[in-house]
Amino acid sequence: MHRLIYHAMLLLTASTQAYSDNTLVVGDFSGSRPDQAYPMYWELLSFDKVPEHTNYSLVSDNGTTVVKADSSQSASGLIRKINIDPEQYPVIQWRWKIVNLIQKSNIHKKNGDDYPARLYITFAYEPDRLGFLEKIKYQAARLLYGQIPSAAINYIWAQNEPVGTLVDNAYTAYTKMFVVQSGAKHTGKWMAEERNVYQDYIQAFGKRPPMINGIAIMTDTDNTGEMATAYYGDILFKGQDQSE
């Protein structure tokens, strides 16, 4: 289902919040009220071919507003379109917590492409940066999968793959999967994450990244038919000097 996210991202209003000259807040969930439908600038994405949708809600967790995701044989996401230069803001920080793993989750198979928590970053299509063969492959992939970005990164909480694993997504090589958390050791605990998106893109695709143009969070269980609950905290982008 993940590939459908990219088309919906193009419909969202681009906007970011700056807490300082070197910090962009793209997911200000803690600044929301638990009684709001969704965080500001974020919208629900549902899929026509999936009858059951993941439920997202703003809830209070120890006095801090976060996003709760409940999935039962379902798939949908929260999405936001953004425009960020990964050279200027290479570092992403976020928090997440899962209640349970998805037992049949498998990073290598389409029918296992479900995760209790994942964070997407998509990148703009810039044809001038692609070689002739890359353009042909991209156009062929669009015919097969529909509207997709020229590249995307998924940061995932996997079932049992080692942390640090990097593989192609089961559906398309234009999406790379980074295992950030794995297994049940930290189930029920808030985990603070930090990744250098600029460096991860170079590792995944072998070249400098284009502009970031979208971000999403998603908890999905439609492929495995299981259930999962997760929580997402604020999402920030920072300049390199603030992360060192």
Image (tube, grey):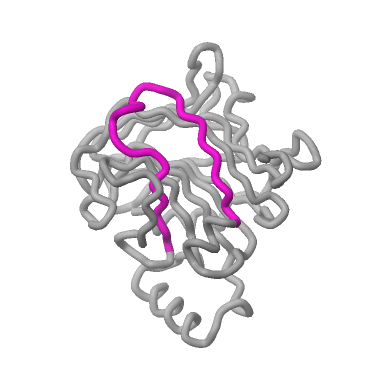
* Position above or below: 181 against 199: above
Query: Residue placed at 34% from the left, 73% from the top?
Result: 144
Say whether residue 140 is visible.
yes
Along the line of sight, the residue nearer the viewer: 54 or 201: 201
Residue 24's image quarter? top right
- The residue that appears at 45% across and 66% down in the rendered structure is 147
Question: In the rendered image, which quarter contains the C terminus?
Answer: top right
Compare residues 70 and 8 and report the one nearer the observer. 70
**Nearer to the camera, 139 or 166:** 166
Residue 232 appears in the rendering: no
Residue in the picture at 49% in, 24% down: 58
**In magenta segment, residue 60:** no
Q: Quadrant of residue 22?
A: top right
Query: Total of numbered circles in the picture?
Result: 0
Residue at the farthest top position: 62
- Where's residue 10, x and y in %? 56, 58
In the picture as drawn, the residue positioned furthest to the right comes out as 21
State the image coordinates of residue 191 (x, y, percent, origin top left): 46, 29
Q: Is residue 65 above or below residue 141?
A: above
Quadrant showing the N terminus: bottom left
Furthest-bottom residue in this view: 132
Q: Is 17 on the left or on the right of 118, as rendered?
A: right
Residue 128 percent across, percent down from the top left = 63, 79
State yes or no: residue 183 in magenta: yes
**Percent from the top left, x then y, of residue 137?**
42, 80
Left or right position of 187 against 83:
left
> In the image, is residue 168 above or below residue 77?
below
Q: Which residues are magenta?
A: 175-198
